[in-house]
Image (tube, rainbow, N blue to C red):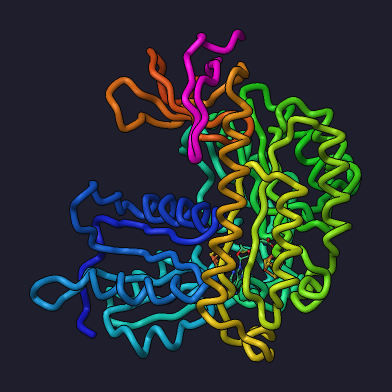
Amino acid sequence: MRPTQIPQTYRVKSFGCQMNVYDGERMAELLAEQGITAAPDGEEADLVVLNTCHIREKAAEKVYSDIGRLRRADGSSPLIAVAGCVAQAEGDEIMKRAPAVQMVVGPQAYHRLPEMIREATGGKRVTDTDMPAQTKFGALPKRKRSGPAAFLTVQEGCDKFCTYCVVPYTRGAEVSRPHADLVDEAKRLVDAGAREISLLGQNVNAWTGEDAKGRTIGLDGLIRELAEIPDLARIRYTTSHPNDFTEGLIAAHGEVDKLMPFLHLPVQAGNDRVLKAMNRSHTAESYLKVLEKVRAARPDIALSGDFIVGFPGESDAEFEDTLALVDTVRYAQCFSFKYSPRPGTPAATMDGQIPAEVMTERIMRLQAALGRDQTAFNKASVGKTCQVLVERRGKLPGQWLGKSPWLQSVYFDGDVAIGDMVTVELTEGGYNAVSARLLGPVPA
Ligand code: SAH
Ligand code: SF4
Ligand code: F3S
């Protein structure tokens, strides 16, 4: 590898979950601190960070095709760093398969990027997939910029070891960031313009910490404290695990106005034998019980979940239990996936792998049911007056896009600006979005 010049411009492309988006933002800030600037849209960057996701098969294949696409007509490439969960899981493989890649950096090691860039421009190919006990956060620059809706990672890693999932291997053990750091970061984000903060974690409701008085608190305690930040209007959190759901968090949904009425609580399947084989450690019934309690605390809560169809051994009748659960819950929105065998996970070598056509038929039936409920939820919200945080312009002239408290995408026309909190009346509901009429700014 020949030495190259120190890059002047960067582009960070993040795939996968919101935690990857958060990491991508932090990498961008880190690069900016080095004097490297964001490449303007449409222009080639000197340094490209592919912040990858390993959760399903296609995600990893996409990385290799993206690397190929970065190649210039003369055969050269920009400086390429592969970060994220594919880097963690397949770092050595990437170095072998993709000679254009100069850096491989795992999710717990990206604070070392500046140093790695110096080594890479000196002609070395460098890999850092360490998971140091001391987290990266202390080494990252303080937050200075934010859009109206910000992400804040409060917890990382996963100890649950669902038998299909790579996350415990790519992200390591569950770690909660200290309370004081989170309050500080939240305040900085708000000073930089955030009106909404989504607290993130692979198991966000497993977060625990000590408050300023030394008392042990859970996620509900953290939410209650962040709600005291005057200019912060909205708080959300994702993703929760049914088994870590505390009475305190349920109560917070009824008591904290700034906590939005939306809950993403993955269930994966509706059949207890399948859930056991997945090592989910909850049953369909215990999951429904949590939802029932949250609904009692906050009757208008919008519910969301994740599903996997075609887990090894899932019979037709067991799949029907998933459809039955969907009929019971009536979700506002959901993600659903075909089971994808991941190398190194227990499920990948289980008997009873499901044929592709069965998988396709099941996902189509599930998505039809989920689509029906999502459209019904959006239609049922027509006529409601609610607040919307303006996040960006819509596609049509004069049109704006924001989110309702229930996380619906809301389109409306009017004289507003990004970051405004406005009052609207919801006028028309479709599958993906809701139209609205602007009533005015939110009274102070
Ligand atoms: N920590 C979260 C999210 C994990 S990844 C949770 O526990 O719910 C997001 C979703 O991807 C999962 O909820 C699951 O539905 C899906 N997923 C994970 N591994 C998968 C696999 N091997 N095949 C298909 N979908 C998978
Ligand atoms: Fe994966 Fe299960 Fe952990 Fe979620 S709880 S990240 S699905 S192992
Ligand atoms: Fe993907 Fe890693 Fe997130 S595998 S879903 S980027 S934790």
Q: Position of residue 360 (x, y in %)?
A: 52, 70
Write down the quadrant of residue 393 in the picture. Answer: top left
Say left or right for 424 vs 284. left
Q: Is residue 265 above or below residue 312?
A: above
Asked whether, in this view, residue 5 is left or right of residue 281, the answer is left
Q: Quadrant of ligand 1?
A: bottom right
| Residue 424 lies in the magenta-colored region | yes
The answer to whether residue 431 is left or right of residue 297 is: left
Q: Position of residue 79 (x, y in %)?
A: 27, 70
**295 in magenta:** no
Q: Residue at x 43, y 54 (%)?
A: 30
Instruction: Compare residues 368 and 124 and report the one nearer the observer.
Output: 368
Q: Answer whether residue 192 is visible to the viewer in this image.
A: no
Q: Residue furthest left?
A: 74
Residue 73 image-quadrant placement: bottom left
What residue do we see at 69% from left, 86% from top?
Answer: 346
Please, is residue 396 above or below residue 74 in the view?
Answer: above
How many numbered marks does the figure carry? 0
- Magenta residues span 421-444
Q: What secondary structure do most residues of the magenta stretch adopt? A: strand
Q: Residue at x 56, y 47 (%)?
A: 371
Is residue 33 visible from the viewing direction of this image? Answer: yes
Give me the residue at 54% from left, 24% from top.
388
Front residue of 350/243: it is 350
Instruction: Pinpoint residue 419: horizontal percent, then vertical percent.
Output: 47, 25
Q: Quadrant of the C terminus?
A: top right
